[in-house]
Image (cartoon, coloured by chain):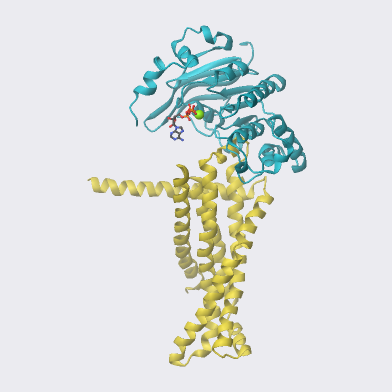
Chain colours: A cyan, B yellow
Amino acid sequence: MNSRPVKIALRGLIKSFGEKHVLRDLDLDIFEGESVAVIGASGTGKSVLLKNIVGILTPDSGSIKIDGEEVAGLAGNARDRVNRKLGMLFQGSALFDSLPLWENVGFGLMSAHGISRADARVAAIERLRQVGLDADSADRFPADISAGAQKRVGLARAIATEPEILFFDEPTTGIDPIMGDVIDNLIVKSVKELGATALTITHDMESARRIADRVALIHEGKIAWIGDVGKIDTSGNEIVDQFIHGRVEGPMSASLLGTPAA
Amino acid sequence: MNFVAAIGRVFLSFLASTGRLAMFAGVSVSHIFRPPFYPRLLLRQIIEIGYYSLPVIGLTAVFTGMVLALQSYTGFARFNAEGAVATVVVLSITRELAPVLTGLMVAGRIGAAMAAEIGTMRVTEQIDALSTLATNPYKYLIAPRLLAGLIMLPCCVLIADIIGVYGGYLVAVHKLDFNPAVYLKNSWQFLELIDVISGLVKAGVFGFLIALMGCYHGFYSKGGAQGVGSATTNAVVSASILILGCNYLITEAFFSQ
Ligand SMILES: Nc1ncnc2c1ncn2[C@@H]1O[C@H](COP(=O)(O)OP(=O)(O)OP(=O)(O)O)[C@@H](O)[C@H]1O
Ligand SMILES: [Mg+2]
């Protein structure tokens, strides 16, 4: 694994919102072609981590390198050039509600890759089919479909341009177990067949075991543990054990329940 | 001491938001001229601003022209100057009333809609999604709206000019028993090109400002439905005040010797 080049390198990442210190000196390396699952309690900054990498948020300090290029603080055309390499599924789907589903999915193809509307529509319908939506749904609007279906359209949009790096923010949350399986398989397939590098945030340990090569746990703004997915049950790390067994008692609870409400 | 600090803080935050607005406007305008362009989006905004505003603008203009003819007639009759009604109507409409009232009506209609749409896109992370799809939100969302406002408001005002003058004509001829031919001749006689042009220049500026305020407040809205609501209010109020202020400045630039 470690013989592969590093695709994403995070060093000393710090991000605060006012008094709230979310990321506190976070380091993480993600190798080319691997699939990493990020787990951690709610509100520990998993989504903030992703948003820093894709440039929606700018870290207060620290370095973010993609393919060896420093991307923290990039803006404008330079950021667009980097972002052409990646696809992201948002936790809240973030579909464009003024566009029909097929235009949502084909958006990146048309807007950033110069593909014609007719071709993009064909490609988009194929992607929709992969996430379990039939061709009839292509002309419907995001507001007319269920939240679970929106999530799947968001996933189709993220993988439509076959990017090198995929970010999934809770891809299976709010989705029934059968469709969850389909989505896990789709993520595995994108990584295995396209050779993409994937970073997936999840609360679902079953899903993490299926899709990930390695698992990283965020706690108090740092990576508290990272290791191969097979070693997660024997990590010897109290926080990991508490998380995967869903216990109320443990080191995680202290920081979650112990901090007074702001 | 506290008092001075409070004033200083207000002043600093005013400077900061002015600077942010200027940056926003500068970046957005620069994207109007740089490819890729989105003609489909521009067309959609042109239709939204130009075509769908026509009923509102037409009604505003026709009633304004009508009441203007009636008011100036009853006023001017006191010193036997009824003959000036046609001229007063045409000059007031083209120079002032058509651009300002059209601007205010469109600010209510379009400024609010833009702030609500872009604000909702902001709080539902659609704008963030745009940038992850390697699409510049300034280019995709803001530039077409600014350009459409700049182009379409003069068109709307030209139509409002015609409808407003026609409203005055209707009242003058059918209610006040003016001779149609004489009324029309009086309308034309003292009208100069600069009267119409100044109105259209105002309209272009107003259209740009309306779109800018709608986009700016939407773009920086935060905090869910409530945030979008106040962005909408701020967009309409700030656009209206800017319209009235700029109206004076442009009038002075054109007509004060
Ligand atoms: N734009 C923002 N402004 C202020 N605070 C923010 C912002 N974004 C996130 N936060 C704060 O940062 C913290 C981490 O948020 P984040 O969304 O990353 O959590 P998460 O780990 O993704 O949680 P979940 O599993 O519930 O999605 C939260 O306390 C949140 O309130
Ligand atoms: Mg999250």
* Residue B194 appearing in the image: no
Q: Position of residue A148 (x, y in %)?
A: 60, 33
Q: Position of residue A168 (x, y in %)?
A: 59, 27
Question: Relative to residue A41, is residue A88 depicted above or below?
Answer: below
Closer to the camera in the image, A78 or A116: A116
Q: Position of residue A207 (x, y in %)?
A: 59, 20
**Residue closest to the far bottom:** B80
Q: Is residue B240 left or right of residue A5?
A: left
At horizontal 63% and vertical 11% (from top left) the residue drawn is: A1
At horizontal 59% and vertical 15% (from top left) the residue drawn is: A209
Question: Relative to residue B228, is residue B241 depicted above or below?
Answer: below
Closer to the camera in the image, B10 or A210: A210
Q: Is residue B243 left or right of residue A136?
A: left
Q: In which quadrant of the rendered view does residue A190 lie?
A: top right
Q: Is residue A116 left or right of residue B35?
A: right
Q: Position of residue B182 (x, y in %)?
A: 61, 90
Question: Relative to residue A230, is residue B200 depicted above or below?
Answer: below
Closer to the camera in the image, A65 or A33: A33
Q: In which quadrant of the rendered view does residue A242 lie?
A: top left
Q: Is residue B248 left or right of residue A84?
A: left
* Residue A240 appearing in the image: yes
Q: Quadrant of the C terminus of chain A?
A: top left
